[in-house]
Amino acid sequence: MLHIALYPGSFDPITNGHLDILERASNLFDKVYVTVAVNKQKNSVFTGDEREALIRECIEGKEWADNVEINQFTGLLVNHAKKLNANTLIRGVRQISDFEYEFRMALTNKRLQPDVDTIFLMPDEEFTFISASLVKEIAYWDGDLSSFVPPIVEKALKEKFSSKP
């Protein structure tokens, strides 16, 4: 039996912390789907297609990424997991406040789809404080992003915020 995991997130943008979790997940599972959540009600910096492309570029050529596929979804996460035959959801947890939210979501997802489990992975300590919203704030004010995101993401953020009001 293949152990298939789904690593969902908005990834707006993908950070070094996300990539750390993804690398470790790819070493734990036979296949990992990185799933970009697309929510029309959210004001995302990048479109779903742009986020998907950035993730692809970030993992291109990485030996650990051979079993990683990237896609997008809308709707209930557990329905998307079932569609992909994923039996595990990967969730990154950086701090206690993340855990409280993720714990509630894991219980809800388990109620909706009992045969899909959630596994929490913590990023390496050097990434525990990084969040996409923090990265966007730094980018907006033209700060140094080099320790937060890969160069391709830094470039894309600078382009997005180059014409800020």
Image (cartoon, rainbow, N blue to C red):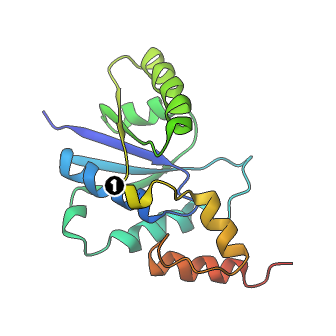
Please, what secondary structure does the residue beneath circle 1 have?
helix
Front position in the image: 75 or 143: 143
Locate residue 18 relative to residue 100 in the image: left or right: left
Residue 48: horizontal and vertical position, in percent? 57, 59
**Picture residue at 64% right of the left edge, 82% below the top:** 158
Query: Is residue 125 depicted above or below 50 in this figure?
Result: above
Q: Quadrant of the C terminus?
A: bottom right
Q: Residue at x 39, y 68 (%)?
A: 56
Estimate how packed mark 1 is, as few (under 14), some (14 to 19) or many (20 or more) residues with alpha carbons within 10 Å: many
> Which quarter of the rendering shows the N terminus?
top left
Q: Position of residue 12 (x, y in %)?
A: 58, 60
Residue 126 lies in quadrant: bottom left
Q: Amino acid at mark 1?
A: Leu
Total number of numbered labels?
A: 1
Q: At 35% across and 53% down in the image, what residue appears?
A: 21
- Can you give x and y, in whole percent of width and height, for residue 98 in the image? 53, 38
Residue at the far left in the pictured view: 1
Is 160 drawn above or below residue 42 in the view shown?
below
| 106 to the left or right of 160 | left
Which residue sits at x=70%, y=49%?
A: 40
Residue in the foreground of this view, choosing between 138 and 55: 138
**Position of 22 compared to 93: left or right?**
left
Q: Looking at this view, is 150 or 55 the one in front?
A: 150
Please, which residue is most extreme toward the right here? 165
Q: Which residue is mark 1?
A: 22
133 with respect to 5 (left or right): right
Q: In the picture shown, does residue 100 fall above or below 6?
A: above
